[in-house]
Image (cartoon, grey):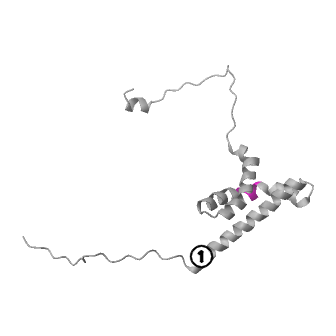
Amino acid sequence: MTAVKTDLPAVLPHVDAPSPPTRAFTRLINLFIAAVDIYALFALVYLGARLLMGERWQPVNVGNNLMPSLLIPAVFLWVGMGLLRRWRTFVLLSPSFAAFAGLYGAMMLPKSVQIPPDAPTLTIMTWNLHRAVTSD
């Protein structure tokens, strides 16, 4: 048997750490965070005006018609900022998230149905996989 010669080095070469994001990418991220901060501040001003003045002020009255579409992004941005650990923006978005959940959260859940006791029933046959797999 002959020896096989390999040209592998005894020590693997050093692998550099991943390069940090470029300056343009960092600026783009910071611009996005600033835009989200401005959105959150405008939402806070609107919610505060709605709480203090009700619908007597015309901008609040117009905002009431647009509120669902204005607050839906807050839900996704709130989760995203929490995952990215942008705590200042997360806290700024929290009232908007809470307002959306409080005002429209019930619409996102299924309605319970009251079935009368004399309603006809439907009986179907199912294949019980749990019973077929286990020996209970």
Above or below: residue 53 compared with residue 22: above
Q: Amino acid at mark 1?
A: Thr
* Residue appearing at x 83%, y 57% in the figure: 48
> Outermost residue toward the bottom?
23
Quadrant that contains the C terminus: top left
Above or below: residue 3 compared with residue 52: below
- Of residue 52 and residue 46, the one placed in the foreground of this image is 52
> Outermost residue toward the top?
118
Provide residue 87's location: percent of width, then percent of height.
Answer: 65, 62
* Residue appearing at x 66%, y 70% in the figure: 32
* Residue appearing at x 63%, y 75% in the figure: 28
Above or below: residue 95 compared with residue 134: below
Provide residue 75's location: percent of width, then percent of height.
Answer: 68, 56
Predominant secondary structure, magenta span? helix
- Of residue 70 and residue 100, the one placed in the foreground of this image is 100
Provide residue 97's location: percent of width, then percent of height.
Answer: 71, 54
Label 1: which residue?
26
Please, what secondary structure does the residue beneath circle 1 have?
helix
| Magenta stretch: includes residue 121 | no
Q: Is residue 110 left or right of residue 12?
A: right
For residue 31, which quarter of the picture? bottom right
Provide residue 17's location: percent of width, then percent of height.
Answer: 44, 75
- Of residue 67 and residue 16, the one placed in the foreground of this image is 16
Specify few, some or many for label 1: CA neighbours under 10 Å numbering under 14, 14-19, or 20 or more.
few
For residue 6, which quarter of the picture? bottom left
* Residue appearing at x 75%, y 47% in the figure: 102
Q: Is residue 124 left or right of residue 115?
A: left
- Image: magenta residue range: 68-72
